[in-house]
Structures are given as C-alpha cells and as structure tokens.
Image (cartoon, rainbow, N blue to C red):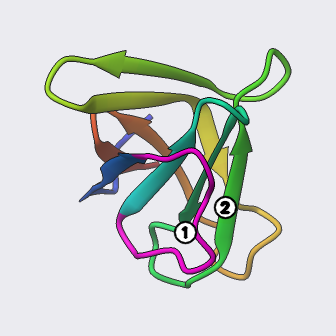
C-alpha cells in the first residue's frame, strides 16, 4: 500500500477516557481495553478501537511510542479515511 500522507499522534495513557478528546491524541485505557481518538483526517468523528482479541492490538515501544493494528478504516464516516498507526505516526493509505 502506498502512504498518501502521515500525521503524528501522541499516545496518552489514562484510566478513563476524557469527555473532551483533543485532536492528534490517542487516549489509551489499558484497564478498560479501549483506545479512542478523533479521526486523524480532521473531520472530528470519534474513533473507538477496542483492545481485545477480536479488536485491535496495541504494541508499546520505548520513548512512549505505540503501534495500533490492524489498520483503521473509517468507511462509515463521511471522510472514508483509512490509516494505520505505526510508532506514533498515522500512515494514510
């Protein structure tokens, strides 16, 4: 797959996901096995990725870097964005 654009993200480890999400931040609750963020295309939709056996896998690296897989396909949103987060960078495909 060809990368169309790259957007940096900041992982934020929390117990509870805050009511107001900030753009460019990936909120991760390991306790509740969930990761949420605002769509990285900028449309503002909330993207929920359950960290379960049937959902997404979070891999942590040194220096507060994370990878979230598989890719995130927001096909139900108007933006139809599709990206994969690898070491704090969303690679749009």
Residue underneath mark 1: 39
The kind of secondary structure element at disc 1 is: loop
Magenta portion: prevailing SS class: loop
Looking at the rendering, which quadrant does residue 54 occupy? Answer: top right
Residue 3 vertical position relative to residue 31 in the rendered view, above or below: below
| Residue 58 x, y percent position in the rendering | 53, 24
Quarter holding the N terminus? top left
Looking at the rendering, which quadrant does residue 62 occupy? Answer: top left
- Nearer to me, 57 or 84: 57
- Nearer to me, 24 or 89: 24
Q: Residues within 10 Å of mark 1 (few under 14, many from 20)?
A: many
Give the residue displayed 30% in from the left and 54% down from the top: 9
Give the magenta-colored segment's residue range: 13-24
Give the residue displayed 70% in from the left and 32% down from the top: 33
Residue underneath mark 2: 47
Locate residue 92 relative to residue 73 in the image: left or right.
Answer: left
């Amino acid at each position: 797959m060809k990368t169309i654009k790259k957007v940096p993200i900041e992982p934020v480890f929390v117990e509870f996901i805050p009511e107001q999400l900030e753009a460019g931040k990936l909120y991760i609750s390991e306790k509740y096995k969930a990761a949420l963020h605002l769509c990285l295309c900028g449309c503002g939709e909330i993207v929920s990725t359950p960290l379960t056996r049937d959902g997404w896998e979070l891999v942590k690296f040194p220096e507060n870097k994370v990878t979230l897989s598989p890719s995130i396909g927001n096909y139900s949103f108007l933006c139809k964005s599709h990206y994969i987060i690898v070491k704090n960078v969303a690679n749009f495909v």
